[in-house]
Image (cartoon, helix red, strand yellow):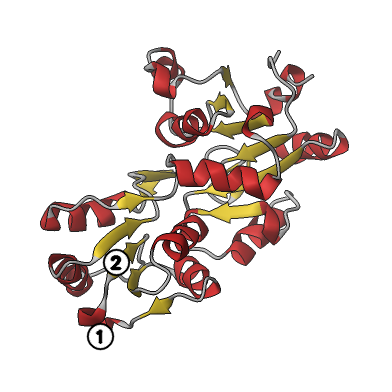
Amino acid sequence: MVDREIKGIVFDIDGCVVRGKKVIPGVPDTLTELRRRKIRFAFLTNDNQNTRHFLAEKLSAMGIPANEDEVLTSAIIAARAARELHPNSKILAFGGAGLIEALNDQKLDLVDHDHAEEAEVVIMGKDPNFSQQRLALACQAIWRGADFIATNYDPKIPVESGFIPASGPFIKAVAYATGKEPLVTGKPSEWSGEMAMKVLDVSPDQGMVVGDSLQQDIAMGKVAGLYTVLVLTGGSTLEEAQDAPDEIKPDLILPDVNHLLEHLG
């Protein structure tokens, strides 16, 4: 039994409630029961290519009714961090529609790639059109002194057939070339945990994170002071969890999300 009252839960998406284009069996019923119990929840993903609207519709189409305001992405977190840290800077962005929309929502000053020399900050997510030319533009801006922000450093994403590369390999290429590590604002950073709790309007001591990754979900929960639950339907294994150091050791390990209800008071 969970040793605290839980009023809000942050769920990872890929590898936790869905895998690829398929919902993990039983999850819709589990979430319906959480709503019945009046436990708030939101979906926090390091996906930064897709928009909040797209992800809410994707979840709903798979049988998980979700509103846009229940979806938080690493792109949204990066954009809000940029608004706080660099409100008046010219920003050169590399990413999909989700990142560009999030930056525009914060009314930040984006420069197009033809004027990359004006950039004072480079913000990177997973860019579906990333190329040798874009690699050069990002590196040149940073070599000229631009600050460097990244949505997340995930190496891979679980899909139905196994895994595909995530944002990390693209961002790592720029970091390696420039010798400058980015400020990473998505999971597992403190930015992501704090923002998730604000979305739920729940204090950390009454919050929980449920995810499939020790390095992202559990690490974020530990930094944010949340109760941490690892599910074994995605990236991390039982053996890895049992051998994990304290900073990423989950408070509870479950086969899947559906076993969560029996542990909540």
Measured Cα–Cα span from mark 2 to mark 1: 13 Å
Pick the front one: 171 or 191: 191
Residue extending farthest right? 36
Image quarter where the C terminus lies is top right
Q: Is residue 196 shown to the viewer in this render?
A: yes
The tag earlier along the polypeptide, 2 or 1, is 1
Residue drawn at x 76%, y 34% as measured from the top left: 30
Residue drawn at x 29%, y 66% as measured from the top left: 122
Residue drawn at x 49%, y 28% as measured from the top left: 222
Q: Whole-percent x and y of residue 112? A: 32, 83
Q: Is residue 159 shown to the viewer in this render?
A: no
User: Please, what is the three-letter code of the amino acid marked with disc 2?
Assistant: Val
Pick the front one: 186 or 252: 186
Horizontal side of residue 148 vs 244, given as left or right: left
The residue pinned by badge 1 equals 115
Horizontal side of residue 210 vs 264, given as left or right: left
Residue 123, placed above or below residue 265: below
Residue 113, placed above or below residue 30: below
Horizontal side of residue 171 vs 157, given as left or right: left
Q: Secondary structure at mark 1?
A: helix
Q: Quadrant of residue 255?
A: top right
| Cβ atoms at labels 2 and 1 below 8 Å apart | no
Tag of residue 122: 2
Q: Whole-percent x and y of residue 190? A: 46, 41
Q: Whole-percent x and y of residue 256? A: 62, 27
Q: Whole-percent x and y of residue 167? A: 35, 54
Residue extending farthest bottom? 114
Image quarter where the N terminus lies is top right
